Amino acid sequence: MIPCIFNWSGGKDSALALHYCLQNPELDIRYLVTTVNDAADRISMHGVRTELLIQQAENIGIPLYQIRLPEMPDMATYDNVMTTHLTHFKNEGITHSIFGDIFLEDLRNYRDKRLAEVGMTGIYPLWKRDTGDLISEFLSLGFGTVIACVQHHLEEIVGKEIDLELIKRLPENVDMCGENGEFHTFAFRGPIFKNEIKYKTGEKVFKEYKAPVNSEASCGENADKILSGFWYCDLLPA
């Protein structure tokens, strides 16, 4: 068997990728690994409370391993923290790391480079699959997911559960799986879970993010401009 960690974001792509991996008897998934904003106690980027993350892991039945990060780490800090934890996994005999990425080549190259530095290899169960096919399969398998955060121009769908009707209403330039970062989700039902995770929607909040200090976007005349803005819907344990 291949000893692995699974990079668990809590969202639909992670859920579908994990579903595929659990059908493969050659994969021995030791941990669900999630990066968490330590200050907010929420899943990084997705903004989902760790109480709901813990419920996901308990209902999947795989130990949860949280990597705690500062709220807005620069790349050097992020890389150092991840290298420390990847080295820990490698020392435990874990050789592979599984991701739910679909088509972002730069991101995969970055992941593979960092893994290679500690002697590990990436596995990508959804790689190059058509995102329309993936979301249709996700729903047909009985998965349920709610949109936890969206880019600023998609405010009307934050806090909504994804179904085929919602997918049809997305603007043409929005990927159906949000692979370009248009939206992030929380998976609460499906074949990987023992029980459905009950939640309720709370307040909706808009947050602005400026360019990291060490990035090219933070230099020159654009230094004080907003890099991006996201609407978050607070999801509460029900």
Image (cartoon, rainbow, N blue to C red):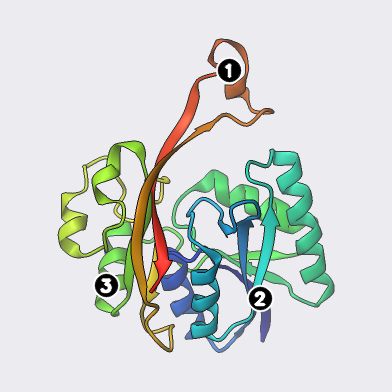
- The answer for how far apart the CA atoms under marks 3 and 1 are is 42 Å
Q: Amino acid at mark 3?
A: Leu
For discs 3 and 1, the disc positioned in front in the rendered view: 1
Q: How many marks?
A: 3
Q: Taking 148 as reference, is 29 above or below it?
A: below
Determine contact: label 1, label 2, CB under 8 Å.
no
- The answer for how far apart the CA atoms under marks 3 and 2 are is 26 Å
Residue depicted at 63% across the width and 17% down the height: 219
Give the quadrant of the C terminus: bottom left
Location of mark 1 (residue)? 223
* Camera-side residue of 153 and 12: 153
Q: Secondary structure at mark 3?
A: helix
Residue 154 image position (x, y, % from top left): 28, 42
* Camera-side residue of 162 and 96: 162
Location of mark 3 (residue)? 139
Residue depicted at 47% across the width and 54% down the height: 46
Residue depicted at 32% across the width and 58% down the height: 131
